Structure formats: C-alpha cells, structure tokens
Amino acid sequence: MTAPRTDPRRDGASGGDPAPRAVVVGGGLAGVTAALRLADAGVRTTLVEARPRLGGLAFSFRRTGGAGELTVDNGHHVYLRCCTAYRWFLERIGASALAPLQRRLDVPVFDARRRRLGRLRRTGLPVPLHLAPGLAAYPHLSPAERVLAGRAALALKRLGTVDPADPALDGTDFASWLRRHGQSPRAVRALWDLVGVATLNARAQDVSLGLAAMVFRTGLLSDPGAADIGWSRVPLGRLHDELAGAVLEKAGVRVVRQGRVRALRREPDGAWRVPVDSGPHRSGEAGETLTAETVVLAVPQREAHRLLPEGALSRPERLLEIGDAPILNVHVVYDRKVLHRPFLAALGTPVQWIFDRTEASGLGGPAGEGGGGGAAGEEGQYLVVSQSAAQDEIGVPAAVLRERYLPELARLLPAARGARVRDFFVTRERAATFAPVPGVGRLRPGARTEAPGVWLAGAWTATGWPATMEGAVRSGLTAAREALAALGRPQDDVLPEAA
C-alpha cells in the first residue's frame, strides 16, 4: 500500500510563507462560503469535497430521456429578498443577474376544489400595511379568517427578536400557537402551511415556534420587500459549481473533488493533520495528508459527528439527535405549454408548488447564460412539482407517483388534459433539510468547538434560520469570521447581520 503523501509546498513546510493554512471539509454553500472568506483574508485554503461537484444538495445533473437531453436541478430552490447572505454569495460569484428577484411579491394560489385562483401579494406600503390589501382580497379565507390571520401576524411580530432557540419558543409547536390565536384548520392549510411547508419543510404541528416566528417575522414583517421571491433562471450547477468553482480558483483556493477526509489528528505543534483519500474510488491506497491551523467542517451533522475530535463538543451525541426531513420532486415534460406563469401554489390537492423549468433545462436548445433554449411551447414544457415534508411519499415508486400526480396536474392545469407526457421522473432527497421540530434549537451547535482551530458550518448549525441556502451561507460566514479572529486576522463582516 502506498503511504499517503504530504505536500510540503502546500503544507508550508518550506518556503518561509507565514500565511496560515486552512482546510474546509465540504463543498456545499457553507463550505464554499467559508473557503472564499478565508482565502480573501490571505489564508491558504484547501477545500475538500467528496463528490465530483460543488453545491451540496443544490446541484444539477444531465438526463437523457423521452424529451431528449435535459439539465435537471435535483430540487427547485428559491430565495427571498431578506436572504441577504445568499444575495451576497450570488454577487460574490457574479451570478446576481442569473437569479433575479420579483419586483414585488406575487404568489398565485389555486384552490383545486373550488376552482378559484387567488394571490398572495404585497404593495409598497410600510409594514404591516404592505400585506393588508392582499390579505383582504385573498379568496381562500373567509372575511373573519382574514381578520384573525392579520391579528396572528401582528402577534408574531410582537414576539420580537428573541433567540429561536429560547426554550420558551423552541419547545412549543407552531400549530398550538396558531390555535391559541384563533387560526382555523382552513387558515392553517391555506396560509400558514402554504408558506411554512415551503420554507421550513414541515407542517405547523411539526415546527418549533421559534423557527416559525423567525420565518414569518423576517420574511413578511421586517420590510415591505422582504418576501419578494428570487430563483435561478439557469441550472443550479451553473451557479453553485461552475461559477463558484471559478471564483474559488481565482481566490487561490485549491479544490480537491472526490476527496474523503478520514479523520482529524492534532500534532504536538498544534497543527491539524487531515488525511484525504482522493479519486473516484477513494480506496485509501492513494491520497495525501493536509496540514492546517484551521479546519472548518462544513458537512452534514452525522459526518461532523464522525470527524470531530474527542472533546470538541461537550455533548456530541446531540448532533445525532438532529433529525432529517425529505423533499420529493416530480418532473414532468409535456409536449406543449400547459402552465402560463413561472410558478403556481396549490390547495385542495396533493400538489404543493409547480415551477416552470423549461428554459433552464435546455429543452429545445442548450441552457446558457440567458437561461436556456427554445421558448416554452416550441419543444414542450418542463414542470417540476416540489413536495416538501414528503415523509409519506419519499419511498413511493415512480410509477405510483405518476398515477397520482398526472391527474392532479390535469385538475390544476386544463391545458395538460390534452397534452402528451414526453418524460416523467422523480428525484428524492431523503435528508434534504434538518427537521425543524420543537426542541431542535437546543441541539444545534454554534460554529465554535472546544478543539482549537476546528469550526462547524452548515445550515443545521445555530444560524437562527431554518435549513435554507441562506442559512448555509450564513453558517459559512460565521465559521470563517470566528476562525479568522482566532488566527489574529479579524475581518469586517460582509453583512453585519449575517453571521
């Protein structure tokens, strides 16, 4: 067996370069963010990612099927105007124009049972008046339910800026709070869960009040434009892998793809030795050992538990108590245009949200900077049905899901009734997010550990946010900020409120 090698040039064993060294383990948004911030501060940084691509769970892949070649996102990801950290990330990688925001929040919501379309939208009035006209006209609630919903929203705002992990909020479920504030089951379905399931990946009864309050207070009640929606007009892989990878290289970050970190070992001089198995097979017969003063573990909580040195956390078993929540995506390619808006939310049907990904997928032509190939309708239309909190369906065979969802899409979209399905497939993420259940706040650790020079990052850490792209980027900013301070290289936060 060939012994792992140590690269003296990269490890700083020669040359007299005083710049500190860092290893970031994990190439999702948290790891990429941490690596960029460390490198920007002059730290020689190596990023190790187990997959052949960057981006974590927000990635793309190529598929050849009945509709030809498509570029497919594993799931449809959106962000809001209040996601200032992710907006910074887009700007940092030069992608802001590829993932623009709505001018103003406008969500079409169709009730399949009543055959009625409503809209959740805002005006330019100050908070909370910006939502009042839209709520007053929202047809999926009765006049009395609208009034009670407005009162509940104001009560959420009055909760203030308390820590979501505060036991008083963290240990209470959101559904109980909604009932105490007069919210009917219909109001929960048509308003609170419509928003909450998409942002928290759980229904109200399974959500910590602390996290729910943070989402609604920040997204709807902090600024008139806070909830305006943005999404990528190109494949996510273009942003989070190609563009992010190019920016990392330009910043001087060495990226090791298909590399698996086996352990962390601290040397007598205080440096960390990081053995890495490299290559597609990672057999252990080839690899290298990195050396660094700083290590950021930007990996899922179970992987972090495996890698953390003994004594790094007082109760490391808590990482294993942070549960996972799945997301299911149903992909359908029709031979014609059947949805005449970018997205649609639904009630009275198993379908939650439908997104048009025709141009981004390259249907009818290659996906490029502008978003894709031919216009929807020329070569058909590619829709994604995004199903959060999908515990009951995550293991259901694709054939069964086809029989379930195609008729539902025909109910919602009359043009789909006569359309031919050119392709149908399913993508599943069984551990898409951490489960935001009551009590999860006490389990989420901060960036700092008791192991000198070892830091944690990931949406599952104590960011104050649910498991979103925003939370992932914030965690990377926090880990890098704390690591740089410990190295004696404090940096101004790129976002004062972000970390």
Image (spheres, rainbow, N blue to C red):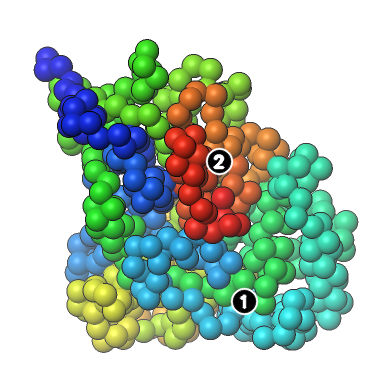
Identify the disc placed on residue 399: none
The amino acid on which the numbered mark 2 sits, given as a three-letter code, is: Thr
Q: Is residue 412 left or right of residue 164?
A: left
Which picture quadrant has residue 309? top left
Q: Which residue is mark 1?
A: 225
Q: Is residue 309 left or right of residue 319?
A: left
Identify which residue is drawn at 75% across, 55% down.
161
Q: Which residue is mark 2?
A: 461
Identify which residue is drawn at 47% across, 65% down.
87
Which picture quadrant has residue 259? top left
The x and y percentages for residue 122 are: 66, 82
In the picture, the quarter occupied by the N terminus is top left
Secondary structure of the residue carrying tag 2 is loop
The x and y percentages for residue 139 are: 72, 82
Between 136 and 43, which is closer to the camera in this rendering?
A: 43
Identify which residue is drawn at 53% across, 73% down.
229
Sooner in the amino-acid sequence: mark 2 or mark 1: 1
Binning the other alpha carbons within 10 Å of mark 1 as few (below 14), some (14 to 19) or many (20 upward) gives many
Give the spatial CA distance, label 2 vs label 1: 27 Å
How many marks the image carries: the answer is: 2
Q: Is residue 353 left or right of residue 365?
A: right
Residue 311 visible in the shown view: yes
The x and y percentages for residue 215 are: 66, 59
Binning the other alpha carbons within 10 Å of mark 2 as few (below 14), some (14 to 19) or many (20 upward) gives many
The x and y percentages for residue 46 are: 29, 39
Residue 387 visible in the shown view: no
Between 16 and 311, which is closer to the camera in this rendering?
A: 16
Secondary structure of the residue carrying tag 1 is loop
